[in-house]
Amino acid sequence: MMRRRTLLATPALLALPARAQTAPERPVRLFVGFPPGGPTDFIARLVAPGLAAAWGQQVVVENRGGANAVIATEAVARGAPDGHTLLLAANNFVMNPPLYAQLPYDPARDFTPIGSIAVSPNVIWCGTQQPWRSLADLVAAARAQPGRLGFATTGIGGNGHYGGELLKRATGIDITHVPYRGTAPAMQDVVAGLVPITVGTLVGTIGGFRNGQIRPLAVAADQRTADLPGVPTMAELGYPMPDTGVWYGLVGPAGLAEPLVRRMATDLAAFLAAPETVQRLATQASAVLALGPEDFATRIRTDLRLWREVAAAAGIKPE
């Protein structure tokens, strides 16, 4: 009789709805597409302890550098959609598609946006040995010698390259892209006067400014930055252009359950609202950018369209 009752009860037990997962249930792997020590790694190691405290689980930062973060991004795209595999994405996440003929993932289809974290704006700089004191000075000099002035960047298809192309479009000037392999060699030649201009994120260039080696001419963002309060935005100067600064955000594989996404987004937003978080981001020339899942998804889609269009107009070819 007991066996019969157990068998009769089994279908009813199977029919009960599964418990909705609302938080990670074991340690979380937070992938970073760059080696330790850079800005993306800093952001990951900043947020990991806060999220771990909120979830009651370890959040382990896993650096998997290579291919401009494609390797780490693919690993997360292929991860199980259970909240235990996440990516600390920078906006090469949306800048990579125009650069590669084939990516092993689709940024819009294969991921679940959870929330953005921080942003550092692009700034138009010149070396301090240059005579220009304002963007108007640079524009006048560029118009007087079309194609003769170069702008140094950290490489083809990066923030600086896209920013420089949009600077050309906004002002109507003709300046020549000079790509380098990283921030250090680009800055070295700007400081030495070999290339007069650079367009670069504040987080990567603020050191040169503090050392008196480069001069800011304009901020390529919607608002002025606290690090350069006296430097106007492009829009203030009459040259509105899209924000090409670097942003950071949290994404997971496609298919994350909505209750889990909400919990993660809420905990991330609470962490970003803490004064200590704001202060620590400021040490990296970055400000909080707290977009929720829907707004972050919109930003990703908007940026994907923009960078494809800019790359096509500038003749940036995929590898």
Image: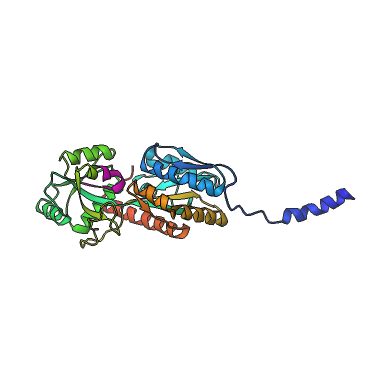
**Magenta stretch encompasses residue 237:** no
Spot occupied by residue 150 in the image (x, y as percentages of width and height): 17, 45
- Give the residue at x 27% y 45%: 206
Residue 82 showing in the rendered view: no
In the picture, the quarter occupied by the C terminus is top left
Q: Residue furthest left?
A: 144
Q: Is residue 147 left or right of residue 18?
A: left
**Along the line of sight, the residue nearer the viewer: 142 or 36:** 36
Spot occupied by residue 60 in the image (x, y as percentages of width and height): 50, 40
**Along the line of sight, the residue nearer the viewer: 318 or 299:** 299
Q: Would you identify the image quadrant in which residue 185 lies? A: top left
Coloring basis for residues: rainbow
**Magenta stretch encompasses residue 204:** yes
Spot occupied by residue 162 in the image (x, y as percentages of width and height): 28, 50
Specify start and end residues of the magenta stretch as a single range. 198-207
Residue 67 showing in the rendered view: yes
- Give the residue at x 57% y 50%: 23
Q: Is residue 290 left or right of residue 52?
A: left
Q: Residue furthest right?
A: 1
**Along the line of sight, the residue nearer the viewer: 159 or 103:** 159
Q: Would you identify the image quadrant in which residue 238 lies? A: bottom left
Spot occupied by residue 142 in the image (x, y as percentages of width and height): 13, 52
Q: Is the stretch drawn in magenta largely helix, strand or loop?
A: helix
Total marks shown come to 0
